[in-house]
Amino acid sequence: MSRRKTERLLSLVVCLLSTGKYLSAGQIREAVPGYPDSFDAFKRMFERDKDELRELGIPLETGVSATPDEEPGYRIQRQAYGLPEIRLEPDEAAVLGLAARAWRRAELAGAAAGALLKLRAAGIDAEETTQPGIEPRLQTGEAAFGPLWEAVRDRRPVSFSHRAAGRSSSQQRQLQPWGVVNRHGRWYVAGLDTDRGETRVFRLSRIDGPVTFRGPAGSVTVPDGADVRELVRQWDAEGPRRTAVLQVRQGAGYGLRRSASAVRPDPQRPGWDLVEVPFSDVGWYSEQLASFGADLVVMEPADLRDAVIRRLKGVLT
Amino acid sequence: MTPATDRLQRLLALVPYVVSRKVVGLADTAAAFGLTERELVDDLNMLWCVELRSPDPYCPIDLSYEGGEIVVSEAESIERPLRLGMDEASALLVALRMLAEVPDLEDRSALSRTIAKLEAAAGAAAAASAQVTVQVDDHGAGRVLAQVRDALDRGRRLHLSYYVPGRDEATERDVDPMRLLVVEGRTYLEGWCLSAEAVRLFRLDRVLALTVLDEPASVPAQARPRDVDQGLFRPSDDDVRVELELSVAGRWVAEYYPCEQVDELGDGRLRVGLRTPDTRLVRRLALRLGEDGRVISPADLAAQIREDAAAALAQYA
C-alpha cells in the first residue's frame, strides 16, 4: 500500500519535473502509472497526492500553457525545486553538523535532520557527530513553542490563555506575533496585542492553554524596523539606578561584592564591611537581600530597608 | 508526514547524494542514510523502476550498483536535492546564530561564512529564521571561555575560583575539563571536579577567576558526560526532599527550579515538591520568598528558617 504510493508519488514528481509545459490532470493520469481507472477515484487520489507533495515543500504550480482555452495544468519548475549550489569548507561543514545537534529532542529536531539530509545530498559531508569540546543545545519544553513558531513563520494571528506574573487567574490574549526570542534561557513571544492596541511581550512558560490560530497565513504584517529582541530586552529592563549601602559580614556576600561599586571595612562594626551596590527595583532587590539572612543589614535607602524587614517578617507570619 | 512521503523524501535525496559524489559505495551510502544495505538496494530498485507511459514510455532514471558501487548515469530531473523548507533553514540558522553569539568562540569565522552560504542557498526560506533569536548571555563569560577552550585543546587541568550562589560562597577547586556546553544561550564547563570526585557543571559567568595549570588533565574512565537531553540538572537520590507552599507571587519557583511535583491549591497558589543537595539553598530561598512561600516539610528545616529570619530581624531592632 505504502510502497505503491511511494512509487506513484515518485513517478509524479519526476513526470512534473521533466515536463516544460503544464500537464493537465488527464495527461498526468496517462503518464503516471498507479492511478485507478475510475476518473472520480483518480481525481480524489490526485488531489491528496498534490497536497502531500506541497507539504513536503515541493513547488507544484498550477497554470495554463499558451492557449487559454486549455484546461489548467500542473508542473514543477526545476529552478524552484532544486537547492541552489552550495559548497562548504571542512570547517564550515563541521559547524553545520554542530548546529544541527542543537535541536536534538527539541521542537525543530526533525527539521534540522531534514536540512542536513538535503545538504548531504548536495555533496556536503556534514556529520552530526560530536565535535570534541563543545556541545550546543536548545530546549523547547514549553508546549506553546511549536504553534507560536508556526504562527510567526506563517504570519498568522493567535490567541492564548496567559497568566501574568503575580496574577491569580489567566487572561485570554489576542496577539499578532512578530517573533520568538530566547533571553536568559527563557522563551518569549512579542507582537501586537490587538485587544490593547499595544506591543506586548509574553513568556512562553506562562501560557497555560492551547495556542489557537485566529486568521489565515500572511495576515500579520510585521512593521518595518520592529526589533523583537529589543522589545524583549526593554520588557526585561530595569528602571533608574540607585545605590544601596549595606553592612555585610566579612567572608559573606560574594555575589553582592562582585557587583559592588565600593567596599570598605565598617569602622563602627569590626568584622563587617560597608558595601555600596547599584540597584533599581526595590521589590526584586529586597528579595535578593533578604536571602542573605543575618549576614547582611541594609543601611540605606529607607524604602529598601523597610522592604527587607517586611520580607523577613513575612517568614514569621 | 506519512511513511510514503518519508520514503519519498529519502529517495529524492538519494539520487543527488550519489550524483554529487559521482560514485559511492553501497555500504557507505547505507550508513549515511541510516539504512541496511538491503533497504538501500530496495530504494535503488524503486528509483530504477520509475517508468512514465506517455507520450512515449520511458525510464527517466538509470543507475547501477554492481560490485558494491553506486553510479547514477541518468536522472536529470531529480539530480538536485529539494530546496530547504522554512523549518529546515530556520532550525540550522537559529542554532548557527546562537553559536556565533558565544563570545570568543574561535570558529567564529567558520560560523559567519556558513551562515552566509546557507542564507544564500535557502533563499526566501531563510527569512522566517530571523523571527526566532537566541540571545547569548555574556556577563564576562567571554573572558574565561578562551582559557577553557585552550585547556580543552591542550588537555590541561584548570584551577577555578567559582561562585556558588545557592550557598553564597566562593569555592576553590581543580577541574579536569571535559567539554563546553552552550545551552539556551548560557555557556557551561563540564568537567571532573577533583575535590568533589565527580562530574560537575560550572556556569562560566560564575567563574570568578581561572588559571590553566601545567598539569595534564586526567579525566577518570568512570566520568560520564551527562545526557544533556535529559535536562542539565537532575536530582540525586541522596538529595533532601522539600515541600513548599507558594502564593501567586511565589509561583515563579515552580518555573525556575525543577520540581518533582506541582499541585494547584486554588487561587493561583501551588504546592511543590523539589529535591536539593544542600538545604542551605532552600533556607536562602525561603528568606527571599517571605510570606510568598512556606516550607511545609521537613519540619526541622522549617524551624531552622524561622530562626534564620528572627536572627536577621534582630539586627534591625
Image (cartoon, coloured by chain):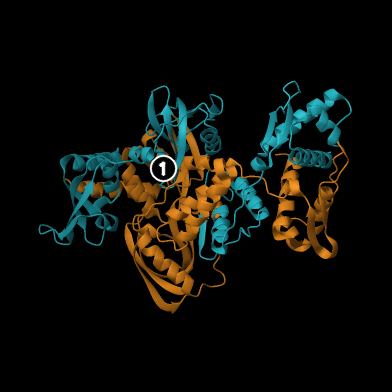
Q: Which residue is mark 1?
A: B253
Q: Which chain: orange?
A: B
Tell me the quarter of the picture where residue A32 sits: top right
**Residue at x-position 48% and y-position 71%:** B153
Residue A245 in the image: state x and y as whole percent: 17, 50
Q: Is residue B174 above or below residue B135?
A: below
Q: Is residue A28 above or below residue A256?
A: above
Q: Quadrant of the N terminus of chain B?
A: top right
Q: Amino acid at mark 1?
A: Val
**Residue at x-position 37% and y-position 52%:** B281
Can residue B33 be seen from the camera position used here? no
Can residue A242 be seen from the camera position used here? yes
Residue B300 in the image: state x and y as whole percent: 38, 50
* Chain of the residue that carries numbered disc 1 in the rendered image: B
**Colour of the chain lettered A:** cyan
Q: Quadrant of the C terminus of chain B?
A: top left
Residue A53 in the image: state x and y as whole percent: 71, 36
Q: Is residue B153 left or right of residue A297?
A: right
Judged from this view, the residue extending furthest toward the left is A268
Residue B176 in the image: state x and y as whole percent: 46, 71
